[in-house]
Amino acid sequence: MEQIIKKYDAKLDNKKRLTIRGAKFSFYHVEEFENGAIVLRPRVLVDPDELSKNTLSMMDKSIENLNLGKASDPIDLHKYLSFSEDSDEV
């Protein structure tokens, strides 16, 4: 179990916003539960300009092949669904 490093009470402002004090990330994935609990998980978004030219070239070639019909048969992912439902953590 992870250790709590900060604990405080907060109040929504007039625009229904909540300030996260000393936040280390700009983006969060939010999960709201029926009991009112809210879980925030940090997300790091990548700037498309940070992708290498090689990566962009491979992506372009893949889309080109897909548009030309050069693609494998669809893959049945049903056998993997139980894994993704069990491990929904980051």
Image (tube, grey):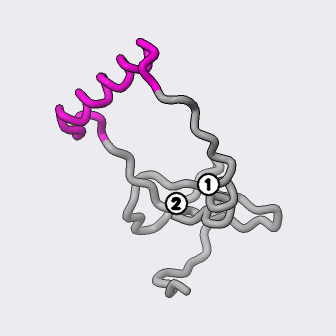
Residue 45, image x, y percentages? 38, 47
Image: magenta residue range: 47-71
Q: Report how far apart the C-alphas of labels 2 and 1 lie in the structure.
A: 9 Å
Closer to us: 72 or 36: 72
Residue 85 lies within the magenta run: no
Q: Main secondary structure of the magenta part?
A: helix
User: Is 18 rendered above or below residue 47?
Assistant: below
Left or right of residue 77, residue 61 in this image? left
Q: Tags 2 and 1 in contact by the CB under 8 Å rule? A: yes
Give me the residue at 30% from left, 23% from top.
60
Q: Residues within 10 Å of mark 2 (few under 14, many from 20)?
A: few
For disc 2, the marked residue is: 19
Left or right of residue 59, residue 71 in this image? right
Residue 50 lies within the magenta run: yes
- For label 2, the SS is loop
Give me the residue at 58% from left, 32% from top.
74
First in sequence: mark 2 or mark 1? 1
Closer to us: 11 or 72: 72
Residue 59, image x, y percentages? 32, 29
Q: Tag 1: residue type? A: Asp
- Residue 58, image quadrant: top left
- For label 1, the SS is loop
For disc 1, the marked residue is: 13
